[in-house]
Image: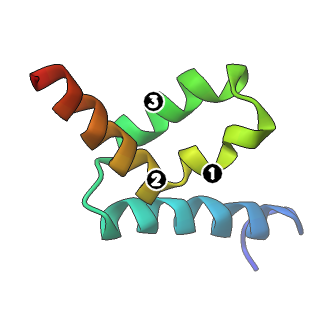
Amino acid sequence: MFIGHPEAGERSAVIYTLLGSCRRHGINPFDYLKDLFTRLPAAKITQIKEFKPAAWFKGKTERVLALDT
């Protein structure tokens, strides 16, 4: 209602949902968004599911475990 543009409300809802999902999965939103904005431009459309917070966290955990071995 007070966003300023009719489409801005929907866009804001998407961002808030994404950040809420990060919180639910125990992800630092800054780390997630930094990685997302770094890797997303070169990603293929088939890789989009990898960027959901839950899948991103799982992939990050697997990458860290792989580095430890």
In the rendered image, the quadrant that contains the N terminus is bottom right
Q: Earlier in the sequence, mark 2 or mark 1?
A: 1
Q: Name the residue tied to disc 3.
A: 34
Left/right placement of residue 25 relative to residue 53 reads: left
Whether pointer 2 and pointer 1 mark residues with C-beta atoms closer than 8 Å, the reply is: yes
Q: Is residue 55 above or below residue 35?
A: below
Q: Tell which tag, 3 or 2, sits nearer the viewer.
A: 2
Could you tell which of marks 3 and 1 lies nearer the N-terminus? 3
Residue at image location 32% in from the left, 64% down from the top: 23
Regarding residue 29, the answer to whether it shows in the image is no
Which type of secondary structure does the marked residue at label 3 adopt? helix
The kind of residue on which mark 2 rests is Ala
Q: Nearer the viewer, residue 23 or 11?
A: 23
Give the quarter of the image for residue 66.
top left
What secondary structure is found at the residue carrying circle 2?
helix
Residue under label 2: 55
For the residues labelled 2 and 1, the Cα–Cα distance comes to 7 Å
Mark positioned earlier in the residue sequence (3 or 2): 3
Mark 3–mark 1 Cα distance, whole angstroms, equals: 17 Å
Residue appearing at x 25%, y 42% in the figure? 61
In the image: residue 6, left or right of residue 35? right
- Report the disc number at residue 49: 1
| x and y percentages locating residue 65 in the rendered image | 17, 33
